[in-house]
Structures are given as C-alpha cells and as structure tokens.
Image (tube, grey):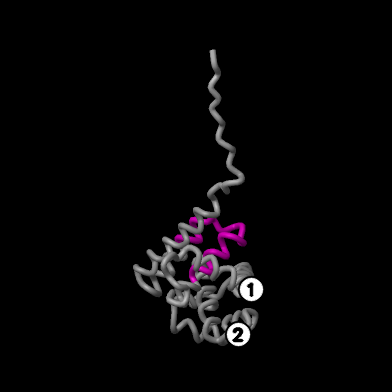
Amino acid sequence: MTRGNARELAIHLIYGRNFTGEEPETVVATRLNKDYYKQLSAENDVYEERPSRAQMNYIDTVVTGVANREEELNTQIQQYSIGWDISRISRLARSVMQLAMFEIQYIDDVPTGVAISEAVRIAKKYDGDDTGSFVNGILGAFARALTAPKAEEQAPEAETVEVAE
C-alpha cells in the first residue's frame, strides 16, 4: 500500500467519524480489523492491500490527531474559506482539508506540496473537480500564510535621512 492509499484510507475514517461520533481509536480498530477490512475491498480498491505497520501508525496518528484538533482545524478552514460558512462545506471536503492541514502542521515527513496535491486528488476523486479547486484554494492560502513572514519579524525599513551640506 502506498502512502497515498494510506492517506485516502485515513480520509475514509475521518469522514466516517463525522457520522458515527466514535472515538478515533475505535474507528481505527474496527475498520482496520482483518475480517472487516476484507469485506471493504469489494467496495473500494484502496482496501485491496492492507496497510503495513508503518502505514497503520500513520493512519492512527492522523485520525487521532485530526479528532483531537478538530475545533482548531475547523477554525483554520473557516478562516481561509472566505465567504463560506463551514457548515456549507461538504463533510468530505472538510475531512480532506482537516487531514491536509494536520499533516502540514504536525507530520514532519509530509512536505506541504504533497499534502495539498494529495488533498486535491482525493477531493476530486470523491467530490468532483470543483471541490478539488475549492480545496486547493483554501489549502494554498493556508500554506502561504504559514510561510509568510510575520509583521513583527520583518526588518524595519531603513529611514532616509537627508544630510545638509
């Protein structure tokens, strides 16, 4: 299983929690149970191969992390989705953005560009091209804001002093 497939599987679990309200540990344990997992392979090709131990750790980390930081992530989504109330954003798009924002901020081995491009790919796959563009715009603004120098960190502009001769 690729990291991209593990990410997609994590999106399924994050998205599912929106409906069940289950604890993340329960969702991961139930959905990744060997017997249950086999049944899912008939529904979606992402379930054809079981995650490795490292991928299981990644999935557990991001599903739990998104659940624990859901309010913070939703606030960030709201901040960058100008003109949209978060309740109007599809649950899938929200789940995709939550995962990408979590990866960008808290998973060291995921480059920002990869988190965004994978989020766009998954959003397009499950919710269409328009959603992919919407997700790209929000995550792009979010990423730019994280890398932009803060006003107080910028060097003060040099003052021009005229010297009388």
Relative to residue 28, is residue 124 drawn left or right?
Answer: left
For the residues bearing labels 2 and 1, Cβ distance under 8 angstroms:
no
Res. 22 mark: 2
The residue located at (45%, 66%) in the rendering is 81
Q: How far from the left and from the top, in percent, is residue 24? A: 62, 79
Nearest to the observer: residue 156 or residue 109: 156
Query: What is the span of residues highlighted in magenta in the rendered image?
Result: 96-117
Res. 149 mark: none
11 within the magenta span: no
Amino acid carrying label 1: it is: Asn
Residue neighbourhood size for the residue with mark 2, other residues' Cα within 10 Å, grouped as few (<14), some (14–19), many (≥20):
few
Front of the two marks 2 and 1: 1
Residue neighbourhood size for the residue with mark 1, other residues' Cα within 10 Å, grouped as few (<14), some (14–19), many (≥20):
few
Q: Quadrant of residue 155?
A: top right
Q: How far from the left and from the top, in percent, is residue 26? A: 63, 83
Q: Which residue is mark 1?
A: 68
Q: How far from the left and from the top, in percent, is residue 58? A: 61, 68
Q: Quadrant of residue 106?
A: bottom right
The residue located at (56%, 58%) in the rendering is 110
Relative to residue 91, is residue 21 drawn left or right?
Answer: right
The residue located at (55%, 68%) in the rendering is 75
109 within the magenta span: yes
Q: Secondary structure at mark 2?
A: loop
User: Which residue ends up furthest to the left in the rendered image?
Assistant: 129
Nearest to the observer: residue 129 or residue 72: 72
Q: Principal SS element in the magenta part?
A: helix
Q: Quadrant of residue 101?
A: bottom right
First in sequence: mark 2 vs mark 1: 2
Quadrant, the C terminus: top right
